Image (cartoon, grey):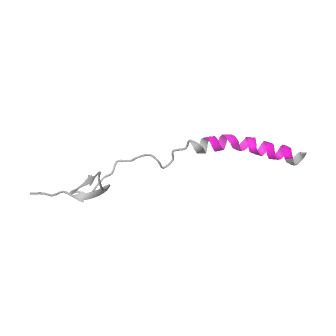
């Protein structure tokens, strides 16, 4: 009987933590890409490419 009560109490105590973890966006935010001087970001390849100067 004690084991069932402790198991149920533990499960109910974990529910809020699971709900918060499911909606967590830590590390998923987008940041602006910055490239070194003389290069620019190419969205097609997702990399920095040298800027052609004439």
Q: Can you give x and y, in whole percent of width and height, for residue 17 in the image?
A: 65, 43
Q: Is residue 10 left or right of residue 19?
A: right
Coordinates of residue 7 in the picture (x, y in percent)? 81, 47
* Secondary structure, magenta segment, majority class: helix
Residue sitting at the far bottom = 50
Say which residue appears at 63% left-offset and 41% top-offset: 19
Task: Give the quarter of the image for residue 13.
Answer: top right
Disc tally is 0
In percent of width and height, residue 47 lies at 30, 57
Q: Residue furthest front?
A: 44
Is 3 left or right of 18, judged from the image as shown? right
Q: Is residue 30 left or right of residue 6?
A: left
Q: Is residue 10 shown in magenta?
A: yes
Name the residue: 56% across, 41% down: 23
Chain part drawn in magenta:
4-19
Which quadrant of the figure contains the C terminus?
bottom left
Give the residue furthest to the right: 1
Q: Name the image quarter holding residue 39.
A: bottom left
The question of residue 13 being in magenta is answered with yes
| Percent position of residue 43, x then y | 29, 51
Is 53 displayed left or right of 28 in the figure? left
**Residue at the image position 90 percent from the left and 45 percent from the top:** 1
* Residue at screen point 67% across, 40% down: 16
């Amino acid at each position: 009987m004690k084991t069932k009560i402790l198991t149920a109490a533990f499960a109910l105590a974990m529910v809020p933590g699971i709900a918060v973890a499911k909606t967590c966006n830590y590390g998923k935010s987008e940041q602006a890409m910055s490239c070194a001087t003389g290069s620019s970001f190419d969205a097609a390849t997702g990399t920095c490419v040298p800027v052609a100067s004439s």
